[in-house]
Amino acid sequence: MGLLRTYLFEKHNILKAKLVPFAGWEMPIQYTGIIDEVNVVRKSAGIFDVSHMGRIEITGDDAGKFLEKILTVSVTKMDIGFAKYCFILNENAGIIDDVVIYRISDDKYLMVCNASNKDPVVSWLSGLIKSFNDISLLDLTLETVMIALQGPSAFKILNAVLNDSNMHSDFLSNLDLFEFCNYNFTFENGDSGYSQISLISRTGYTGENGFEIIVPNGIGLRIWDQLHNYGALPCGLGSRDVLRLEAGLRLHGNDIDQTSNPFQAGLKRFVDMENSSFIGHEELLLQNEKGIYKHLVGFRMLDKAIPRKGYLIMDSDKNIIGEVTSGSHSPTLELDIGMGYIMGSRPRIEDDIILHGRGRNFNARVTKIPFYRRSLN
Amino acid sequence: MTMIPTDCYYTKEHEWVRLDGATFVVIGITEFAQDQLGDVIYVNLPEIGSEIQQFAQMGEAESVKAVSDLFSPVTGTVVEVNSNLQDTPELVNQDPYGEGWMLKVELSGTEQLSKLLSSDQYSDFLDSGEH
């Protein structure tokens, strides 16, 4: 089967992106270089084509009730115009995917899931929807473009793009974290497009301030070009992975998967235990009682080596206690950092550990997550 | 188009070798190799005085994306290591055939150079897509 291409694919070619297969898509991993692009996002602003991510609209009178069975949050308690990060769990509380759920209206929601998990997520939803009346699932992935604009200059750039075409932008400065605005982009030259969904949200996956923009395919390219013209530089999935790790954000398939649950991953705050109807709730209660037997921890390297997924983690007596799930060089911190699971009791911050990979041992130290936090001024 | 200087020999593992006098060579990795690696963060090389074997592993180059083995293109004794790569490994990306050189080696014999590729052969090898 051939690889899928986003609506912006030709643009990536023109920009001389290095393209790689990713979750069934042919995606830009970098344009100028991963380190350059990380620095751009930390110091000014970058744009990422994240159109490969799954976008599924869920509509119907029972949509809220249905989603409260699927998701670890109480979606019916969410205000319209807000989004939340949460999980889809299986019966054992293993993480099928981590998603962002948007409440569009009383009976309409949008779920953004990982590209690599879209098929399992859709079949999970389709299997459970049968016991509910009149809920429709609509996959909008191929008819919309999703662009992440991230970095300290994101606000200034988006504001300028909207003003340039005489579009309203007052709401932008008041948009809270995880708040979004249904937004009808209408460029003066007539560029427009139609899809069920068109919105700007204050969300992202980099640890920087920024926005994610979901629009009909017809105007995706125009928005990308405008953001680029106003100074946001194209960034690929390579830098996105480094940025999210610096910010301590977990990656499904690495740091979380169906063999781990949100408590083990240190993500309890994204689980509303008062919503007792979600699948996996009972198992989480049980696990909480028994005690958590593995913990995701962050660490920084003391030796000059980049931790890699699959490297073993040992205590200072060289007993194997876990495994690395993510690792990278951090250009922002000028350190090598990683995350991994450690079995048994939770290790203390600043505990020394040893990593083992490629036949060698490397010294490392347990470190607080996130590694990087943006300054708030 | 990737740069392939005509005054070097090459390996299928993307190392280059340049004669420096009759019995010494300088070695490094090619433009193609650095482009594949992306931003180089660490270069682990053998110490001065070590013996290295042609086509055997001699070190590692670690980039943000991956860690890759480096293979020695020649047999001989390491006489110099590019110590600038400790603090500025990005030289490998910026100037792979110049400032980004890795080792200077005293050859154990010059006949071994015939086992290496010429610039034309290396260029054909890259074009063949077998790498």
Image (cartoon, rainbow, N blue to C red):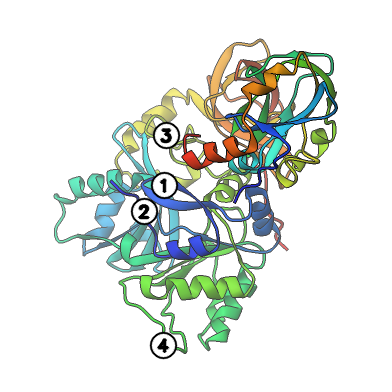
The residue tagged 4 is: A190
Q: Which residue is mark 3?
A: A261
Q: Which quarter of the rendering shows the C terminus of chain A?
A: bottom right
Where does residue B20 sit, x and y in percent of width and height? 83, 29
Q: What residue lies at 55% left-to-right and 29% top-to-bottom?
A: A340
Tag 1 secondary structure: loop
Mark 3: which amino acid? Asn
The amino acid at mark 1 is: Asp
Residue highlighted by disc 1: A272
Taking the image as shown, residue A67 lies to the left or right of residue A35, namely left
Distance (Cα) linking label 1 and label 2: 7 Å
Quick one: label 1 or label 3, which is nearer the N terminus? 3
Residue A59, image x, y percentages: 24, 64
Q: Nearer the viewer, mark 3 or mark 2?
A: 3
Label 1 packing within 10 angstroms: few (<14), some (14-19), many (20+): some
Mark nearer the N terminus (1 vs 4): 4
| Towards the viewer: A235 or A343 | A235
Q: Are marks 2 and 4 in contact (CB under 8 Å)?
A: no
Q: Nearer the viewer, mark 1 or mark 4?
A: 4
